[in-house]
Amino acid sequence: MPDFFCIFTSHHLQMVDILSTKIEYLKGIGSKRAELLNKELGIVTFGDMLEYYPFRYIDKSRIHKVSEICDDTVYYQLIGTISNLQSFGSPRTTRMTAVFSDETGSIELIWFKGFKWIKDKFVRGKKYLVFGKANIFNNRFNFTHPDIEEYDPNSTLSGETLQGVYNVTETLKNHGLGTKQIAKIMKTLVLQTRDVIPENLPSELVKKDNLVSRREALYKIHLPSNANDIEKATLRLKYEEHFFFQMRMLLSKRSREQNMKSVVFPVVGELFNTFYEKYLPFPLTNAQKRVIREIRADLKTGSQMNRLLQGDVGSGKTIVALMIMLLAIDNGYQAALMAPTEILATQHYETLSKQLADMPVKVALLTGSTKQKDRKQIFSDLADGTLNILIGTHALIENDVVFKKLGLCIVDEQHRFGVAQRAKFWEKTPYPPHTLVMTATPIPRTLAMTQFGDLDVSIIDELPPGRKPVKTIHAYMEQRLSIISFMKRQIAEGRQIYVVYPLIKESEKMDLINLKEGYEALLRDFPEPEYRICVVHGQLSADDKDFEMRRFVRNQAHIMVATTVIEVGVNVPNASVMIIENANRFGLSQLHQLRGRVGRGADQSYCILVTDHKISNDGKRRMDAMVATNDGFAIAEEDLKLRGPGETQGTRQSGQIEMKIGDLTVDEPIIRQVRYRVNEILNDDATLSKPENANMKTYFYTRYAKTFDWGKIG
Ligand code: ADP
Ligand code: MG
């Protein structure tokens, strides 16, 4: 168990505060409703309930009239009577309706469940308060499963002008726990606990960063008097959520740095310097130089490096990898470079072999299709240390691959590999080797700080000089003829073209048919021998794929028709057009990756996104984003907004973040601030044993440390 557990002593565990009281003991809840709250919303304790924040507020003082209903996205609050209760579907009721009226008109109420409860509930002539969102059906508005309560002009709730609206499930609604009831329960709870809610941040910090107290925040988030209350409470609660998240990340990082000893690379030697002075094929960009410096600093410390290298497609990560590997060799160690596909591994091998041709460095390639004879040779060279660099696919982490002295492993396009696979390298050495994970998927800064907050991150934020930005066009299917003539002109100028089809597991058969039909259509439009087309997809054998791929790389084919197998890493600088069919079916970061395959040479390049006219709003937004910008980070930010953190590419599969109030799409300034603060605190009090940090430590331990994911080793 990591050391940092030792900083907690048992008395921290004894903290019994009112917030850990089971919710069933709250007045008006009872065991049945408590069970429902637990099942539907995961709420067990008072504390959980208090952290079930409203997702918006309505102005309670505002009572609408039926005649005002005109929008199906707005919540309305109406006062009126209920009549004409009817059941439909016999003999079993499947639907009930009623008519709700005020002096300006009437509107239908509809239920699909909870009939008995409804039948017993309404009394003719009584006034009810109805609250909900209006639906449109057959051009008329109705309320489906609205919140309804008897109207009481003296009701305590009507005292507040702003009332929180809570997310509730259908099941909760059917059991009389709609957003209004939740608000009521919350009020009871807030009033009961208000004076005993402990602060969980150091008081100095609360003052310095101008936060309201936790007590105040939890009160005002549920029972605000005005917009200012909501703003202050929200800020404080977001701050707190991010704060403890960063604490978790940074404690883990520190513990790793202290405990994961690795080899030291003290010298910048002969190989590194010779390469830099004599064989570097181009001057490095400033970003490349900075990143190499950052990595070198890590390698001198004696702690294991665990660094993420982010750089947009084409930003030149490979040369960085090469130079760092030379550093390892200079210090007497071997290096491994692992890529997710055979094509990419082969390409890395070819590039590096060429660049190292005149240097005394031995490089080999190991993939699933390496011949038995060659494998034997590689294994023997690895074991006696004559092999310096091994490049390959997953084959590298198999058990029979034994290094003499592995000191560095570099993983390209990391999102294709799981943590477990990376950890397998560790079994090959007596100490964890330095690890550099490279990715061309730009990760939005907020996500990087939270998801990868325990890793070090280096960013290449500059493309090599002379690149012309790719021109991106959104085209429709029926523009095919002009697309074809455009392709012909490009080919006449000596360029090559990618045509990519989506292929996903769920619709694999259909997708393959599309690809084949597309391929055949292209064969008709681009007849041999004048034109040559190659095709690469997942169903080809590795040999065939390689063969086809090679034809394109060597400029023996004008067009490559492919599925997303080319997504990752392939470098064909002469290719200048990327046509993406059914582009709306790709995610934003995938589209951006694909576009990155072109624009690598000196020529103007193009990306044509082909879709149907009918695409979803999100699909349209993705196309627009692609047309609007070439900036991978901007694309990643948009992707985060469109899909949320759970879906964004580059997120870690394990331990996904679920935030209660924090929002990675907008909270960047807060996250930066709390990260800075947490570091400040840990620098001053690494074990959190100073009295002023006691409340924070207790809270952190009881809330987070128990579920701490120690498996996150990068
Ligand atoms: P990625 O970051 O996508 O892996 P690569 O390492 O494949 O990018 O580099 C893309 C292309 O840019 C390669 O052809 C590489 O030789 C070239 N390149 C990399 N760095 C520079 C540089 N500093 N100046 C000019 N060209 C460069
Ligand atoms: Mg690359």
Image (spheres, grey):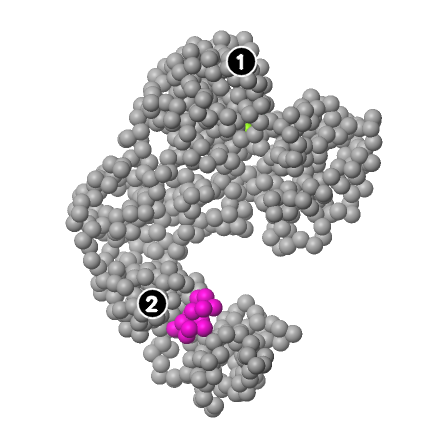
Q: Which residue is mark 2?
A: 34
The residue that appears at 37% across and 22% down in the rendered structure is 429
Decide: is 201 above or below 112. Answer: above
Q: Nearer the viewer, residue 495 or 584?
A: 584
The residue that appears at 72% across and 30% down in the rendered structure is 534
The residue that appears at 62% across and 76% down in the rendered structure is 140
Q: Which residue is mark 1?
A: 356
Residue type at mark 2? Ala
Of discs 1 and 2, which sits in the foreground? 2
Measuring from the top left, give residue 696's x and y in whole percent.
24, 49
Judged left or right of residue 406, residue 558 is: right
Judged left or right of residue 471, residue 248 is: left
The residue that appears at 75% across and 30% down in the rendered structure is 533
Q: Quadrant location of residue 425?
A: top left
Magenta highlight range: 168-181
Q: Nearer the viewer, residue 9 or 688?
A: 9
